[in-house]
Image (cartoon, helix red, strand yellow):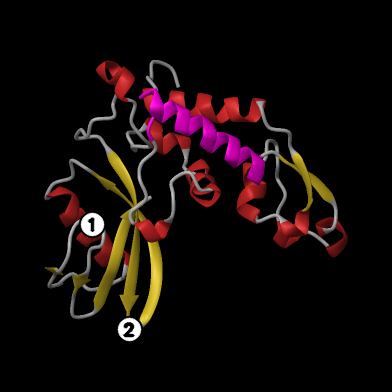
Amino acid sequence: KKEEFLPLELIICTFIHELAHTITLPEKHQVQYVPQTILNLQPLSNLNKNKMSKKELQEWVQIHHCGTFYKKFADLLKEAEKLDIFFLPKPCSRSAGSKFDARFLSRFDQIDVEMSASGFQIGRTPRFSYCSSSSPTSKTKYLVALVLMTGGKKSVKSVVIEKGDKGGFLSCLLEEGRKKGRLGKKLQLEVVALPQQTVIKTEECLVERYYII
């Protein structure tokens, strides 16, 4: 868009991503063995496995975001961290694995660019912090996954929380948990643990934990 500045973190991360493509050859896989989320990342791809015939599912397709690509991407990101150029956000817990795992990087790739341009934090760049938006501001947004327990059933909901929202980050998290759980307006909340493994008890719902994606 005209007269709109992009976050420096987004530009640097995108550059590293594209640089990884320059040193990775695409691989050919049968469509039926490629997750739909990976198919969606391929350039000019409009493949929808749910609408394909058995014969079409057996066809071969070039995969640019293959396992080898994410290994190269991870190697470049590690070097970028050593040079203080770019740091990916850390996973919520040890059980979530390394932020350099292919699964984590694949999910990171699926973040909407528009979200980053509007203030969603995708990382930080200490080396260029004098012109960076990496420090939390009133416009910083976080993509949060809530694990909800309602009536004995577990569900995962993704929400966007703005750091500067009225009432603070946690209050907004609780409010979004209430909305996602489709609960009534009257709600008693009790914070049991903070910050990354947070349990929120209510009469109708239990937010088992949350983590920043």
Q: Residues within 10 Å of mark 2 (few under 14, many from 20)?
A: few
Residue 9, given in percent of the width and then of the height, sits at: 39, 27
Q: Compared with residue 176, is residue 188 higher up or lower down, i.e. above or below?
A: below
Residue 60, given in percent of the width and then of the height, sits at: 83, 49
Which amino acid type corresponds to the residue marked 2 in the rendered image?
A: Gly
Residue 135, given in percent of the width and then of the height, sits at: 23, 30
Q: How many marks?
A: 2
Q: Is residue 109 left or right of residue 2?
A: right
- The quadrant holding residue 87 is top left
Which one is in front, 168 or 179? 168
- The quadrant holding residue 56 is bottom right
Which amino acid type corresponds to the residue marked 1 in the rendered image?
A: Leu
Prevailing SS of the magenta stretch: helix
Question: Residue at image x 35%, y 24%?
Answer: 84
Residue 72, given in percent of the width and then of the height, sits at: 59, 35
Question: Residue at image x 47%, y 40%?
Answer: 112
The label on residue 151 is 2
Quarter of the image where the N terminus is located: top left
Question: Residue at image x 25%, y 16%?
Answer: 130
Rounded to the nearest whole Å, what is the CA distance between mark 2 and mark 1?
20 Å
- The quadrant holding residue 63 is top right
Q: Compared with residue 55, is residue 122 higher up or lower down, i.e. above or below?
A: above
Q: Compared with residue 24, is residue 96 higher up or lower down, i.e. above or below?
A: below
Can you identify the residue that label 1 sits on?
173
